[in-house]
Each structure stands twice: as structure tokens, then as C-alpha cells.
Image: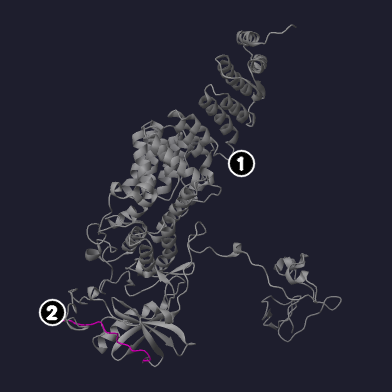
Amino acid sequence: MKCTQPGCDGTLLDGYCDVCGMAGSPGATSGVSSDPAPGGVPAPPDEATGSVATSASRLRAAAIGTARMAPTAAPRRRRTSGRGRAPGLGAGLTRVPTAPTIDPSSALLTDPEVPEHRRHCGRCGAEVGRGDAGRSEGFCSRCGHPYSFTPKLEPGELVAGQYEVRGALAHGGLGWIHLARDRNVSDRWVVLKGLLNTGDEDALAVAIAEQEFLAQVEHPTIVEIFNFVTHRGDGYTVMEYVGGTSLKQMLQQRRTANGGRYDPFPVDQALAYVLGVLPALSYLHDLGLLYCDLKPDNIIQVRDSVKLIDLGGVRRIDDEESPIYGTIGYQAPEIADVGPSVASDVYTVGRTLLVLTMELRGYQDTFRHRLPPVAAAPLFAEHDSLHWLIARCCAPDPADRFASVEELRGQVLGVLRETVARDADTVATTSATSTHFELPETSRPPTEWSQLPRLRPDTTDPQYTWLSGIGAEAPERQLRHLDAAPASSAEVRLARARAALLLGRTHLARESAERLLAEDPWEWRGVWVQGLAAVQAGDWPAAAAAFNAVHQQLPGELAPKLALALACEHTGQPALAAHFYLTCARTDAAYVAPAAFGLARVRATAGDHGGAAAALELVPQTSRGYPEAGRRRAEALLVAAGNDLRGIDRALRILAGAQADAATRDDFTVRALTAALAALEAGAPPRSDATIGGWPATVRGVRDGLEQALRGLARATQDRPARIELVNRANAVRNWSLT
């Protein structure tokens, strides 16, 4: 029978529609009709079934698209918008120039030949085939291993009865890479790359079997492996042709355009490239695979995306026998002893980012396994967060690196956001959610530990559900509950530390932090708690050391920077404090107000009251701290003005636009006009065409304003002696009159 759902043309099979999947009316089965509702239309199912009765199809919808056009109207082309398009490189934070797709036939080498300076023995690495008598084929004079730099495949040659060779593309570590057409699949372009260990049939079979797992790798940012074939005793990997430009080629092009001088990528662009390739590494790690050989050569940009190529070095995480492939200058130092790991892949990310952003002469020898000092690397001095991002990726001990690519990705994104904001040189208008910290809860400048961003709870903690039940209780009761927790965990220790801090028991907070770090020396949250406890105890050097350690562990997070700025204020480092405050204000809208207040405080302490006023101007009108920012800005401008009448007038106008009670306004007006009157009486030229706070910029005009403000203060004062003094002052400045 037909489906009973309105508008559906399906057929009921075993009681369910083969089109919409909904059940038929009660009693309806295949070949059995149901009684129609009055009017010949099947009755809709009951509302409890959650089908038609709860569907938005029952509601009227406004006409849109072709429904708004007349039946006879000519077809029109839709306008498109970029808003629905997924962001390309840079996660929508920055723009990366697109790379054109390269026509495969134009990429072929007209005269495929390996330069002599790149001819090395594949077994021992000795120089071969060089000099006047250099030959492209022969035997190594050191180890006797045969070598050949002549392409093995000729144009027009058919490989495995399917792939028609068109020519050579390049020469890699495994030999020549050829371009071919796949005759069996729409003549698509493919790449043929030779396999190692193919000296005999058995070795060839083993080599192919070892690489078969690569055909299961399917990810949009990883080159696709189509097949493994043999031809004339040699093995070849058949892979997708990626018609783009490698980052190494781009660096070479930039050097040429720069007159032969190294021209690294802008930091935001380099971070965008790395951010684009990290999902590929994460995907491989989830499959239990390691990439092993990340470098600019193996990252290809195609239009507005990147692709990871050359899977020749990919191996299983638990593989302890296969050869290890890598590149000097990128390979982690522990590879020779313990082999590759997720940590060694993270190391290659850091080294790749290093090469993309700076010229590091000696990165394959002098700085093979270390970074240059900050004093010798202007890039590190200028981009502190980038420095610590690379430093943690390339930590000598694998345990000190990012534990996963996903953890690294979050910090790369944060550093990119900070870099883009720095280049824009404006305050942030958007906010981003951190996986580690809550947003600041106050728009006031931080002065104590409780005003710093809170740690975001770890929902995967085994005691998270239990802890949720005691979160709103008083700190004293929390401590009692936490002492009786079903089991200890990191979140239990952190909750205990916070409750102790709220009660002023600094020693208990430190004790919880120490136990947390004893269980896991890499638990940065324990160091964060140590910093909070140091703030509460007034031990600012210890606080600065703790927050700096967290900043180095999480260079993409703003909370450690805000905390470090506060600590630097109290350790005599105003320049660093101002830098971190300004970084926070530029990067995230939620940090603008507290950071702007902190920056103003630093500048005012240094005597730069004009700079303090400029910092307070950063606070947006939408912030809860905007009224206070206006009042403080007026105060800073008044101090900065001195005897300058225009500056005094500006301060009064700023206060007039701020939310302040009458007493505050009158008190400020008294101080401002007193300074203006002193300036005028000292000889400052009066201006009848100008005003000061709405009063004529003359001695008489200022006296009238000052008298009015003093009498306003007197009316609001409850203390009788103070009121009398204010009235006397008002009488003293009153202009003489005949009435």
C-alpha cells in the first residue's frame, strides 16, 4: 500500500515506508489498506509518535527563492556570499595568498638530471658520480653499492598495464618521481614513486606488503595512495598528483625575489601553514601511525589549502624494525636511541615552523638539536609567544614537548590569534573560548589572586561528577567534603587548593599543589596554583616565576599573560607588565577592560598620565567597567594637563560623559577649576571664545564655576565643619558684584 504520510509517494514494506522511513497507520501492513480519514486523506499519526504532529512542515513558511518568482520569470543566477564558506588557511584569522594549481604537463623536466652536488650513495652517503669522469650510473667506491641517477621509466612506457608514463617530475630520496596517466580511471594524472628494498622478488613483495596500510589513509590534507605496482622488477607507489607548490619552493622564490637574501614567511602566514597541516598529523596518530618527516618540502599549498605529501617515512607507532626515515635538522635527537614517536613528530613541527619564520644558519649542524638564544634571534625577542611555542615543540626531552598534536594545535591557534591582533594594532572586538581557563569575571584591573581567570574544570577527571555536587557550598564545608572524597584526583586537589585560598589558608593550597606536582611533574595547573598562593602571600617574585612557567607551557593562552603582567608590576618590571597587558587587550575582547586598567596603572605609576588616559580609552562602551574607565581617564588627563587650560577642559568634558554622581562631579570640578584659576591668575591668556567645563575661559567665568561646584559640595556634605569650610571657600572665590 502507499505511505500514509502527507506528500510522500513511498510504499509501506513490513509496516514502514521505503522512502520516508515512517511507520504506517495502525494496522497498516504491506498489501493491506487502512481506513482513510474523512475526506479520503489518511489520518496523521498520533502526536506521541513524534512524526507529522511535531514537524515544522505543519507551519506556514514565508516564500523564499524560486517561490518568490513568477511562474513565467526567466531563470536567474543566485548571488553567492563568502560567509557560508569554510575558512581556508589561517582559520579565518588571517589571509594567506592563494597558490595557483600547476598544470601537470608544465611541471615535467625537459632534461631530467641530478646535479652532481646532490649525488650520494644510497647506502653509506658517500659522494658518487662526480667530477670530470662522473657517471650517472656505477658503483660506490666506498661500499660497492650500485647507484643510478638515470630515470628508470621512459615517456610512453606503460607501467603495470595501466599507467602511461609522461616524464620525470623530480628526483627524491627514493629515486625519480614520474608523472603518468591512469588509463583505467578517466585518464587522471598520477605520480609514480619508487620503493626501496626491491633488489629481488621477495624483497619487493615484503616492501609492498609493508606499505599496503598507506592505501587505507584517507584525509583531505594527505596525499592519497591509489595503488602499489611492480614493473620490470621494481616497485612503485601510485599516488594522487598534487598540483601545488611546496613551502620549500615558496621560500626559494621569496629568496630570489629578495635579491638572494633569505626572506622568511610572515609569522601569521607560517602559523597558518602549520595550523593547516596539523589535522593530518593528528589523523595519522589516531590511526596509530607516525609521519616522521615533516618539513617544508613535504607541505604543498594548493589554492587556499595545504596537503601533506610523501608518505614514504610513515610507519606504525609500534613498529620497531622498519627503517627510519627523516631529515637532518628536523629529526628529533632521540630518534637514534628510542625511535620515532608522537613526541618526535611534534619536534618536526617546531623545526618546520622555525625554518618558515627565520633564517637559521647552521640549523643542520650548529643548531641541529638546539635553538639560538633570544639575544641572537630578533624574531624570538619580538614574538615571545612564538618563541615558547617552538621551544616546547623542540624540547630536548620528549616528555617536555606537547603531549599530542591536538594540544599543540590549540596553542598554535592562540599564538596565531595573538600575532594577527598585534599586527592589527587595535583592541580586540571578539572573544575566543579557552579549553584551559574561564574568561575573566571582572572588568576591573586584577589586584589579587581571585580576580585572575579561573581554571576550567577537566570534565574527563574521574571525580568530576562527584565534585559538581559540592561546587556551590561554602569553602569551609567544601574542604570537609574534599577531605572525604571517594578518591583523589587532580580536580579534587585543585578544588581543595581553591577552597583553601578562599579561606586564606595559603599553606594548604601550596600543599595541594605540591601533591599534584609530585604525582605528575608536568601538571602545569599545580604551578598555576603555586602562583595564586604566592600572590595571596605577597611573594611576588615567586608568583612571577610560577606564572612565567605556565606561560611557557601554554604560549597561546592569555590568562598566564594577564597574571604575569600583575606579577611584573610588583617586581619592578613595568615594561614587561605593559607588554603583557597590551597583548591581552589586543587579542581578546573579554580581556580588554582588565588589561586596559592594568596598563593604565603601570603608566600612571611611571608618571605617564597621558599614556594612562590613552590606555583607559581602550575600554569599550559595552564593558561594565566603562563608567569607571571614564572617571579614571578624566583623573589622568587632569594630572597630565597641569596648568594647560585646554587639557583641563578636556578632562572636565570626559568626566561629563562618564557616569558619576553629583558629589564626584563637583569634587572633580573644584579641583579642575582651582587649577584653571591658578593658571589664569599666573598669567595664562584668557580666551573669551573658549570654555573650561562649560564656563568661559576667563578669571570671572572660572570663578563662577568654582563657586557653584563648592556650594554643591557643601549641600551634599553631612559634616557641619566641612560644610562651613566649603561655603567659606565659595564666598572667597565669588566674583564681586553690586548686589
The stretch drawn in magenta includes residue 567? no
- Residue in the image at 67% along x and 80% along y: 19
Quarter of the image with the C terminus is top right
Q: In the displayed orientation, state which residue is furthest to the top.
A: 738
- Residue in the image at 26% along x and 87% along y: 202
Q: Which marked residue is nearer to the observer: mark 2 or mark 1?
A: 2
Q: Which one is earlier in the sequence, the residue at label 2 or at label 1?
A: 2
- Tell me the residue that label 1 is attached to: 622
Asked if labels 1 and 2 touch by Cβ distance under 8 angstroms, the answer is: no
Kindly identify the amino acid type of the residue bearing the numbered disc 1.
Thr
- Tell me the residue that label 2 is attached to: 141
- Residue in the image at 42% along x and 54% along y: 411
Q: How crowded is mark 2: few (under 14 residues within 10 Å), some or many (20 or more)?
A: few
Q: x, y (%) of residue 733?
A: 63, 11
> Where 67 falls versus 209 (above or below)?
above
Assign the magenta stretch its main secondary structure. Answer: loop
> Where 541 falls versus 270 (above or below)?
above
Where on the picture, by quarter, is residue 148? bottom left
Q: In this view, does 10 lie to the left or right of 389?
A: right
- Residues in magenta, as a range: 141-157
Name the secondary structure under disc 2: loop
Q: In the displayed orientation, state which residue is furthest to the right.
A: 39
Residue 399 is marked as none
Q: Can residue 170 be seen in this view?
A: yes
Name the secondary structure under disc 1: loop
Kindly identify the amino acid type of the residue bearing the numbered disc 2.
Ser
Which of the two residues, 54 or 327, is positioned nearer the viewer here?
Answer: 327
